[in-house]
Amino acid sequence: MKKLCTAIMALAMVGCSTFPDEIATENEDALVSYKVAKHQGEKVEGEPARWGGVIADVRNAEDHTVLEIVSFPLKRWGRPLVSDNSQGRFLAVVDDFIDPGVYKQGRSMTFIGRIGETQQGKIGEYVYTYPVIEATGHYLWDVEKQRSQVEIDYSPLWFRHNFYSPYYPYRYPTVPVRVRVEDNSGTPAKSRN
C-alpha cells in the first residue's frame, strides 16, 4: 500500500508542471545552472539551461534582441528570487523584437534555451565576461504588489508586561506585534512596531 501511494504521488507530481508553458521543459535534470555556466564556460556550451533575473538593459538589433540580466536564483516555479546579492550578469539573446517600453529595467524575467559562447562587455569601466543563453522561450513576470507580513510575539504574558517588577530579575523587551512592509523586489521597505 505504501509503494502504491508513493507511485501515485510521483505520477501526480510529474503530471503537473509548476512552470509557465513558455519556460517549461520535460527534462529538468539536464538543465545547467547559471553558476556552473559562469565557471565552466566553454565546457557547457550548447547545453540546455533555465536562468532568470532582473532586466538591466535591452538592446534591439536588426534581427534579434540582447537583454542584459542581473542573475538571481529561481524559485521552484521559475520566478527569480530577487535579493541584495546577485549571482552576476548574463546576456539573453532572443530571436525577436523585444519592446523596451514593456520589458523595462527592473522587471523580472526567466529564460529557457541553450548556453551560447561567452561574450566580453563592460559594466561602467569594468570588463565583464557574460555567460550567454540563446533563448528559445522567455517569460516576463508580473510586478509583485506590496505585501505586509505580521509577526506576533508569543512570549508569556508576564514577560511582556513585567507583572513581577521590580522584584522580577529578568526584563524582556516589549514587542507585541511587528509589521514589515516589503517593496516589489521582496526586500523590506520599512518596519514598524
Image (cartoon, rainbow, N blue to C red):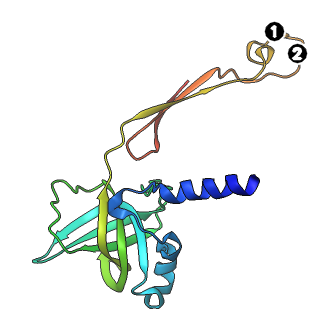
The percent coordinates of residue 52 (x first, y second) are: 39, 63
Q: Are marks 2 and 1 in contact (CB under 8 Å)?
A: yes
Q: Is residue 116 visible?
A: yes
Give the class, few, some or many, for how many residues have Cα within 10 Å of label 1's Cα (few <14, many ≥20). few
Residue lying furthest left in this view? 62
Q: Quadrant of the C terminus?
A: top right
Q: Secondary structure at mark 1?
A: loop
| Residue 64 higher or lower than 175, as above or below | below
Which of 95/87 is in front?
Answer: 95
Mark carried by residue 168: 2
Mark found first going from the N terminus, 2 or 1: 1
Q: Secondary structure at mark 2?
A: loop
The percent coordinates of residue 173 (x first, y second) are: 71, 24
Q: Amino acid at mark 2?
A: Tyr
Q: Amino acid at mark 1?
A: Phe
Residue under the point 48% across and 90% down: 43
In this figure, which residue is indicated by the disc labeled 1?
163
Mark carried by residue 176: none
The percent coordinates of residue 158 (x first, y second) are: 80, 14
Q: Is residue 55 visible?
A: no
Which of 112/37 is in front?
Answer: 112
Residue under the point 32% across and 45% down: 143
Residue under the point 45% across and 69% down: 26
> Is residue 84 found left or right of 4 in the rendered image?
left
